[in-house]
Image: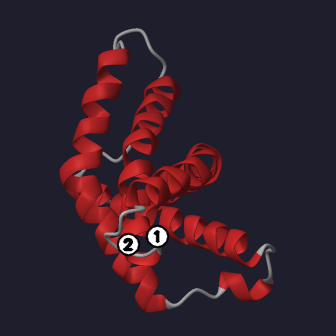
Amino acid sequence: MPKTKIQKNIFSVLMAFMMVYGMEVYNHAIINKKLTNELFMLPAVQLVLLMLTVIVLESFIGGPLARKLAFRLVDLEKDKPITVILKVQTMTVCIMCPIMSLVAAIVFKGGFSPRLLEKWAQTVAINFPMAFCWQVFVAGPLVRLSVRSIAKVLKI
């Protein structure tokens, strides 16, 4: 877990990148009904805009709410650090996946239409299992390792 403000900022940017990139590749693979090498070359502008959206929504809504919910389930005196991390990750996915699925339904699936609720629900159902697994098994561990390594090298 990041300890300083600089580490938290690095963590936020790296996590936003990892989650946006992974979920975009996943969603494009679903749309194309296959995973190809070309899918890994996502438009940079789209990635940056989605990353900024994630950072803003996570900073002001998802993160605070996820931590509040997770720390209701955590006993900091007794629980191992990995337990705390997994609970925070789980709550973050439970909050951010529906929020970002709503953004995706609005931006990529027809905007504010009479079918928005159904498109949003379907997007959540498709994205949640991948978002959870990607967060817990790939993005979370890689970003924590990266932040620890960067902090050690830069002494921040």
Q: Which amino acid type is shown beneath numbered disc 2?
A: Met
Residue 4 % position (x, y):
24, 51
**Residue 51 has which mark?**
2
Q: Height in image: 107 above or below 99?
A: below
**Residue 17 has which mark?**
1
- Of residues 117 and 32, the one drawn nearer to the viewer in this rendering: 117
> Circle 2: is it few (<14), some (14-19), or many (20+) Cα within 10 Å?
many
Residue 106 % position (x, y):
36, 70
**Residue visible at 55% across and 53% down in the picture:** 122
- Of residues 15 and 99, the one drawn nearer to the viewer in this rendering: 99
- Whole-angstrom CA distance, mark 2 to mark 1, is 6 Å
Q: Residue furthest toward the left?
A: 60
**Residue visible at 81% across and 74% down in the picture:** 34
**Residue visible at 30% across and 73% down in the picture:** 52
Q: Is residue 80 left or right of residue 58?
A: right
Q: Which amino acid type is shown beneath numbered disc 1?
A: Phe
- Can you see residue 70? yes
- Dot 1 falls on a residue whose secondary structure is helix
